[in-house]
Image (cartoon, rainbow, N blue to C red):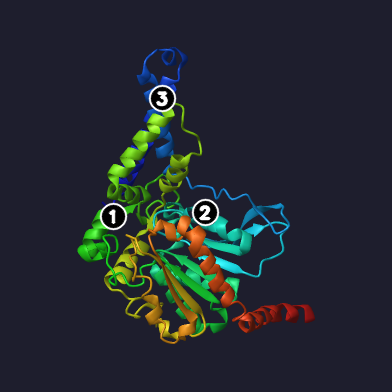
């Protein structure tokens, strides 16, 4: 399947379905047709509206949609999304709250690069903004990255995180959600050994596969059931001529989406059938529950092939993080070198993607960390989504994470002071000259 023609065929199918939906909607809403006393006309218009919207969302990056936050003064403060570090495969962005004094509590959210955009964590960001300065990793769609920008695998991902943490300073509190948890742990250990003044103050790992074999699920055990050659043939294609990344090897977002939806095909089919019925009856709204969920769920991005394949091989098959055998640029990362970064794990008892035990496996790996700097929590009754964006996150997990951050606040004040002094030295020298 590693051909441009296959990639372009999928895009043609998507585009055709979007066109069919638009055509059905336009025909059914034409005055002469709409006047016909036949319920099938309303149904055709409804089917067209839902179909067009759904297939159009598959190639559009969602907006953050976070416009303001209420400050301690009771006023709404406008939010601007500002780029702090710009890189070919992903940026570090800051949700700057205009007119509000800088919050002492600073948080870096590490978003997954697993098919959806970082906007999947929109509600997580919104829940943290009133109480913290929030930064997030905003990964780019691989189809938009020219081949000339090079490769991007798990080691490159780890080094991106290292650079982002360095840019933010040692008083940053890192929260890694799901897929990036193992690589964020490795990036922290890398800094702890090679640049201790840049390591974060706290590290919270939420539902991540640190050790996929600790409690295998259908998702995490997938890597053990397929050979790398077979996986490459099934999943990898070249970006077609329509996009700037033409020729780049990727795991296409449309192919990922078909896999996501096939896991719960009956549930999705029922959801779309019900939505068409609501539109036909005039009960649906532009931002109703269905559209709010599927506008985000259907918006998918291509992953660099080398990142996807190296994740499966090194994190899931070879368990390099779990066995503390991960290397970056030829340097063996030792998780035991983490000695003064407080580490907390969060899991959901009903998580069917990263089951309880997979994320908590990070704590025994931190052999150099005293027990008082380790914490683990399992949210009873919560599934995967709930532990970072649902009711469980809002009501119980978020307050616990913020308390954990506050308990360790100031522990890296000395490192932050040294780092700022080191940054200021060249500027002072230049002024003196």
Residue tagged by mark 1?
A: 235
Could you tell me which secondary element the residue under label 3 belongs to? helix
The residue positioned 62% from the left and 63% from the top of the image is: 131
Q: Are marks 1 and 2 in contact (CB under 8 Å)?
A: no
Q: Quadrant of residue 375?
A: bottom left
Taking 184 as reference, is 381 above or below it?
Answer: above
Out of 234 and 41, give the one closest to the viewer.
Answer: 41
Could you tell me which secondary element the residue under label 1 belongs to? helix
Residue tagged by mark 3?
A: 45
Packing grade of label 2 (10 A; few <14, some 14-19, many >=20) is some
Out of 230 and 133, give the one closest to the viewer.
Answer: 133
For this orientation, the residue located farthest to the right is 432
- Residue 1: where, in percent of width, then height? 26, 51
The residue positioned 28% from the left and 47% from the top of the image is: 262
Counting residues from the N terminus, which is met first, the one under dot 1 or under dot 3? 3
What's the CA distance linking mark 1 and mark 2? 28 Å
The residue positioned 40% from the left and 22% from the top of the image is: 42
Q: Is residue 2 visible?
A: yes
Q: Is residue 156 visible?
A: no
Counting residues from the N terminus, which is met first, the one under dot 1 or under dot 2? 2
The residue positioned 38% from the left and 19% from the top of the image is: 41
- Residue 304: where, in percent of width, then height? 38, 59
- Residue 401: where, in percent of width, then height? 52, 68
Counting residues from the N terminus, which is met first, the one under dot 2 or under dot 3? 3
Packing grade of label 3 (10 A; few <14, some 14-19, many >=20) is many
Which quadrant, please, contains the C terminus? bottom right
Residue tagged by mark 2?
A: 122
Could you tell me which secondary element the residue under label 2 belongs to? helix
């Amino acid at each position: 399947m590693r051909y441009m023609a296959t990639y372009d065929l999928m895009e043609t199918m998507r585009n055709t379905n979007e066109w069919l939906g638009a055509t059905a909607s336009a025909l059914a809403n034409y005055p002469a047709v709409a006047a016909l006393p036949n319920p099938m006309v309303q149904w055709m218009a409804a089917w067209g509206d839902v179909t067009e919207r759904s297939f159009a969302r598959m190639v559009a990056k969602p907006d953050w949609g976070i416009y303001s936050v209420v400050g301690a003064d009771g006023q709404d403060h406008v939010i601007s999304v500002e780029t702090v570090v710009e890189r070919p495969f992903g940026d570090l962005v800051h949700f700057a709250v205009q007119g509000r004094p800088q919050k002492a509590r600073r948080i870096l959210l590490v978003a997954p690069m697993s098919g959806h955009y970082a906007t999947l964590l929109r509600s997580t960001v919104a829940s943290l903004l009133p109480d913290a300065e929030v930064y997030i990793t905003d990964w780019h769609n691989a189809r938009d990255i020219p081949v000339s920008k090079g490769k991007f695998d798990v080691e490159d991902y780890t080094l991106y995180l290292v650079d982002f943490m360095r840019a933010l300073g040692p008083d940053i509190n890192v929260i890694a959600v799901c897929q990036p948890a193992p690589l964020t742990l490795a990036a922290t250990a890398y800094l702890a050994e090679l640049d201790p003044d840049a390591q974060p103050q706290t590290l919270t790992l939420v539902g991540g596969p640190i050790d996929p074999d600790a409690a295998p699920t259908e998702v995490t055990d997938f890597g053990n059931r397929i050979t790398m050659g077979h996986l490459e043939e099934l999943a990898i294609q070249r970006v077609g001529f329509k996009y700037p990344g033409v020729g780049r090897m990727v795991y296409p977002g449309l192919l990922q989406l078909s896999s996501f939806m096939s896991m719960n095909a009956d549930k999705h089919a029922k959801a779309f059938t019900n939505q068409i019925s609501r539109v036909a009856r005039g009960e649906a709204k532009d931002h109703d529950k269905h559209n709010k969920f599927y506008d985000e769920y259907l918006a998918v991005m291509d992953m660099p092939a080398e990142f996807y394949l190296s994740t499966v091989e090194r994190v899931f098959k070879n368990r390099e993080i779990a066995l503390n055998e991960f290397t970056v640029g030829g340097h063996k990362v030792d998780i035991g070198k983490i000695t003064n970064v407080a580490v907390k794990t969060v899991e959901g008892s009903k998580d069917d993607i990263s089951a309880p035990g997979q994320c908590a496996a990070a704590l025994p790996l931190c052999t150099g960390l005293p027990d008082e700097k380790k914490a683990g929590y399992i949210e009873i009754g919560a599934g995967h989504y709930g532990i970072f964006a649902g009711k469980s996150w809002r009501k119980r997990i978020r307050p616990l994470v913020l308390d954990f951050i506050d308990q360790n606040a100031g522990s890296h004040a000395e490192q932050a002071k040294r780092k700022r002094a080191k940054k200021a030295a060249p500027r002072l020298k230049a002024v003196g000259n």
